[in-house]
Image (cartoon, helix red, strand yellow):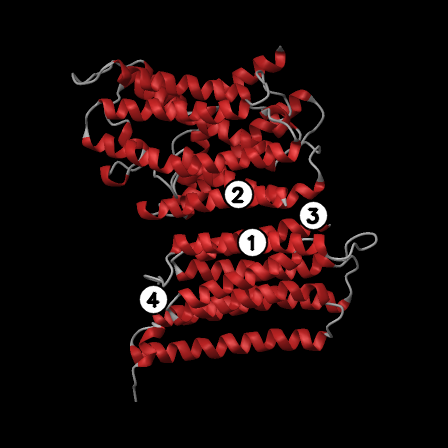
Amino acid sequence: MFDLINALLVTLLALNLFALGTSRIQSVIRIVAVQGALLGLLTLLMHDSLSFPVLLSGIAAVLIKGLVIPAVMMRSLRAADIKREVEPFIGFLPSILLGAVATAAVILLFQALTAAGPASAGAPIAPSLIAPASVSTILVGFIILVSRYKAITQVLGYLVLENGIYIFGTLLVEAIPLVVEMGMLLDLFVGVFVISIITNHINRAFSSMDTRRLVSLKE
Amino acid sequence: MLDALVHVLMLFLLPPLLFGVIGKVKAFFAGRKGPPLLQSYRDISKLLGKGSVFSGTTSWVFRAGPIVALVAVAVAGLLLPFGASSAPVSFAGDMILFAYLFALSRFFTTAAALDTGSAFEGMGAAREVAFACLSEPALFFVFLALSKLTRSLSLSDMLGASAGGLPAAAMAPLVLLCLGLFVIILAETCRIPVDDPATHLELTMIHEAMILDHSGPLLGLIEYSASMKLLVLESLLISLALPFRSGSAWLDRGLFAAETLVLAACIGVMESVMARLRMRRVPYLLTGALLLGGSGFILLVR
């Protein structure tokens, strides 16, 4: 079971790299959607017995992260009438390399931490890749956030970041009450919904989605 | 003995069928009927029956190019296990020979292209070599990770071991390696995200630009070795990703042939749903493959 989970996490990490490397915003939305759906699957796989909270939070994640949020993003992308992120602050190839180096560094760091920590008796509590995958996805989210200029790509960076946090959260599905879990997903959905509306307004007011233009005053 | 015989027969007879399958799938997506499955065999035999025209500026390198390329790929095919049956030739370190046989074939193809003195062919050769700089290390990372995983240096052990022999913990790196290997296959066989085999616009071609001056039997050999290259690389991926075994030797051989066709159909789907990448962006894809292989290796070493 742990191997299947690790394979899933590694797929998530590979998707991170693809998200860093494509300029087409539509493809990035699709990648983030697949990531979200895989996260829902991950929640279901993490637990031997499928209790009601686990099942519900898994399905909710697949629905909201994999279907609803991407649909909203696609909608605002169509309204904004842009297709690509041109000339990001950090180029596509450098950001892939940066992401890969960050991922490798995090994996090695966690390896060192596990080796230095107290030797636990018996089987490890968590599959080895969960924590590094979570942290490196968060880092990739940061890279997208700081290196892209279009408002909508920055939202995508935020979603990748949230996916990273969610990976860590899957460890605690049974510890966190279902209400909190659902509340987080709802917050995320409302956040993306509002941001999509805001980006539309930015687009209308500045006739561009470029966040660098926001420094100039408008009525 | 029988194993080796079947291996060689498959290596020499199966490849053009893969092109047929890719063509059919692409035609299906385009809503056309498409050429018959066996069309590639007919094309190649027609080309082999034709006469050749040689430019006055070419030397023996031009004529040797396609032949060396074909022989190198065929020998590389002998080093790989096809499905359950083991490879006819196998020794420690043959993975290095495998990678460099591909390099040899590439060297002679590009040398033959440069030999014509045509600007377009020189450009195609330059592109081919530049992209190979990225796809070759990616292939080596895959081999490195596999040899680390199986503690062996021969391709037969490295690939044959995945028939349930690989430790279960290897699944995470294996996913990365298979993804990387798929990109390598697309790049090496000049399929769509990297190069479009159907295009004949000189400015965007890679592989097709290098063979513009070849005609007749030599062109037939080039087509044939391109399809054989596809089969050889596919069998590499199949041993990793689809190591199914039925137990009966003949069933396994049929299974392997079916798997190569399925993979060819996957490539056909890829070609139908994607557009060719801009030339500037191809290195990003190949760097991605390199990083996938590298991360697979790091996951194993840690």
Query: Tag 3: residue type?
Result: Asp
Q: Residues within 10 Å of mark 2 (few under 14, many from 20)?
A: many
Nearest to viewer (mark 1 / mark 2) = 1
Residue at the extreme top of the image, as rendered: B1
Residue beneath label 1, please? A105
What's the distance in space between the residues labelled 4 and 1, CA to CA?
35 Å
Label whose residue precedes the other's in the sequence (4 or 3): 3
The x, y position of residue B252, in whole percent, is: 65, 25
Secondary structure of the residue carrying tag 2 is: helix
Considering depth in this image, is B90 or B199 the residue closer to the camera? B90
Residue at the extreme front of the image, as rendered: A116
Instruction: Write down the chain letter for disc 4.
Output: A
Residue at the extreme left of the image, as rendered: B56
Secondary structure of the residue carrying tag 1 is: helix
In the image, which disc is placed on residue B294? 2
In the image, which disc is placed on residue A3? 3
The x, y position of residue A173, in whole percent, is: 72, 67
Instruction: Write down the chain letter for disc 2.
Output: B
- Say whether marks 1 and 3 touch (CB < 8 Å): no
Is the residue at mark 2 from the same chain as the one at mark 3? no
The x, y position of residue B93, in whole percent, is: 56, 23
Q: Dividing the image into 4 quarters, which one contains the N terminus of chain B?
A: top right
Residue beneath label 4, please? A82
On the image, which quarter does residue B104 sit in? top left
